[in-house]
């Protein structure tokens, strides 16, 4: 069995799970703006903990499969598309680690009953939603690159 026969389905599965998970969070995120400040913090905490460690594992698994495909695929177009997918996933992970995760960590330290006096000024909802859309779009684009790889192989 050729490596591409294992790597391609694994990339599609992991990439589909990652893109789907981020798509769900993109769709659910506008709910955050409708919540009172006191409700927002516990709801955010509850949703975020449901996605960890699922999202990092899915993103990293797909990234590793794409890197391996970029190195070993027998067709140049597949290697290029897999490399593109890997770059898009690396960008999504970078957004997660530098933008969304710090917000999640800060919110996890807050007591919803005793929010900082300047929480209205610090409220991260709009920033979190904006960056969540960016990483969701990157993950979906990576999945499309992997679907294109599959189409080339067929």
Image (cartoon, rainbow, N blue to C red):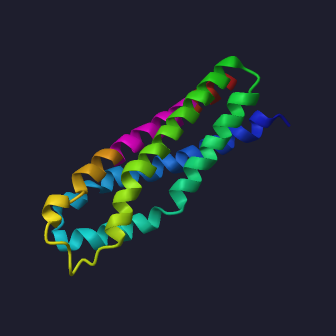
Quadrant for the C terminus in the image: top right
**Dominant secondary structure, magenta:** helix
The residue stretch that appears in magenta? 132-145
- Residue 22 in the figure: left or right of residue 76: left
The answer to whether 32 appears left or right of 140 in the picture is left
Left or right of 115 on screen, residue 152:
right
Q: Relative to 41, is 69 above or below?
A: above
Q: Is residue 29 magenta?
A: no
Above-or-below relation of 104 to 70: below
Residue sitting at x 77%, y 23%: 74
Residue 34 pos. (x, y %): 17, 61
Q: Is residue 154 visible?
A: no
Q: Quadrant of the N terminus?
A: top right
> What residue do we see at 61% from left, 44% from top?
62
Residue 50 in the image: x percent, y percent? 45, 67
Task: Report the residue that reaches farthest toward the top.
Answer: 76
Residue 83: image quadrant is top right
Q: Is residue 97 left or right of residue 149?
A: left
The percent position of residue 51, horizontal first and vertical second, equals: 46, 62
Residue 76 visible at all: yes
Residue 69 falls in image quadrant: top right
The one of 12 and 119 positioned closer to us in this rendering:
119
Q: Residue furthest right?
A: 1
Q: Residue at x 29, y 74 (%)?
A: 110
Q: Residue at x 20, y 80 (%)?
A: 114
Q: Position of residue 146 (x, y in %)?
A: 58, 33
Rendered position, 32 above or below 4: below
Based on the picture, tell me whether residue 135 belongs to the magenta stretch.
yes
């Amino acid at each position: 069995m050729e490596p591409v026969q294992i790597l391609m389905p694994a990339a599609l599965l992991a990439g589909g799970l990652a893109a789907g998970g981020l798509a769900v969070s993109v769709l659910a995120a506008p709910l955050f703006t409708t919540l009172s400040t006191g409700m927002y913090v516990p709801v955010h905490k509850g949703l975020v903990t449901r996605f960890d460690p699922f999202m990092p594992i899915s993103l990293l698994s797909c990234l590793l499969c794409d890197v391996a495909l970029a190195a070993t695929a027998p067709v140049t177009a597949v290697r290029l598309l897999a490399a593109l997918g890997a770059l898009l996933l690396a960008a999504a992970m970078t957004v997660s680690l530098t933008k969304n995760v710090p917000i999640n960590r800060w919110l996890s330290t807050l007591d919803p009953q005793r929010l900082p006096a300047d929480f209205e000024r610090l409220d991260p909802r709009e920033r979190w939603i904006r960056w969540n859309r960016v990483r969701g779009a990157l993950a979906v684009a990576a999945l499309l690159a992997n679907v294109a790889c599959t189409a080339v192989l067929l």
